[in-house]
Amino acid sequence: MTQQYNFDFEEYEDISKLNEGDAALLLEARKITQKAYAPYSNFLVGAAAIFANGEKVFGTNQENASYPVGICAERVLLASASMIQTDEPILTMAISYNNLSRNGGSDRPISPCGMCRQSLAEYELRTNHPMRLVMSGMEGKVIVVQSASQLLPFSFSSNSMK
Ligand code: THU
């Protein structure tokens, strides 16, 4: 029997079409791209998230001369989140990037890598709460998904080991 996996996502022309909270978070994600350490890829990623208690947390990608050692902005953010607010749900994470090797800027929404999807899904499971993702570049289109786990169907989790 053929089955389907479907999910709804929202697509906006630009930041001006977002609600106030999402727009503020995306602006912070765009701004913090400046703090990325990405001398090898010149692809500066910024992430900003808001906890259920209103506190915010940020992350940027941190690269290394030994390339695989580098960490994506999303996982830097989650590691920080775990330290400052253990088990507090994250309601929304905004992600943006500045592609310096293409003269800076970016107008296509970013999408988290597979390893980050796995980490995002575990954060949702651990806090028992969906995390919305607001994905964009420095300008233009914005994609919003209601739960990070939707980007990782058939995922492996602690449940898989029970
Ligand atoms: N990167 C992120 O930080 N987040 C993403 O969602 C995609 C990729 C980083 C990893 C690496 O430092 C650079 O972007 C190029 O892949």
Image (cartoon, rainbow, N blue to C red):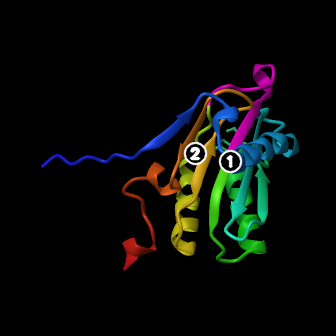
Observer-nearest of 12 and 151:
12
Q: In the image, which disc is placed on residue 154?
A: none
Q: Is residue 116 above or below residue 111?
A: below
Q: Residues within 10 Å of mark 2 (few under 14, many from 20)?
A: few
**Residue receiving disc 2:** 113
Residue at image position (74%, 66%) is 54
Q: How many marks?
A: 2
Would residue 6 appear left or right of 104 to someone viewing this image?
Answer: left
Observer-nearest of 21 and 45:
21
Query: Which quadrant holds residue 124?
Result: bottom right
Query: Which quadrant holds residue 143?
Result: top right
In the current view of this chain or complex, which residue is farthest to the bottom? 162
What's the magenta region?
95-108
Q: Is residue 126 above or below residue 138?
A: below
| Helix, strand or loop status at disc 1 | helix
| Helix, strand or loop status at disc 2 | loop
Residue at image position (62%, 33%) is 109
Q: Amino acid at mark 1?
A: Asp
In the current view of this chain or complex, which residue is farthest to the top? 103
Cβ atoms under marks 2 and 1 closer than 8 Å: no
Residue at image position (52%, 73%) is 128
Q: Position of residue 38 (x, y in %)?
A: 81, 40
Q: In the image, which disc is placed on residue 22?
A: 1
Q: Quadrant of ligand 1?
A: top right
Residue 31 on the magenta segment: no
Badge 2 or badge 1: first in the primary sequence = 1
Q: Is mark 2 within 8 Å of ligand 1?
A: yes
Q: Amino acid at mark 2?
A: Cys
Q: Position of residue 61 (x, y in %)?
A: 76, 47
Query: Which quadrant holds residue 131?
Result: bottom right
Q: Position of residue 64 (x, y in %)?
A: 80, 47
Quadrant assignment for the C terminus = bottom left
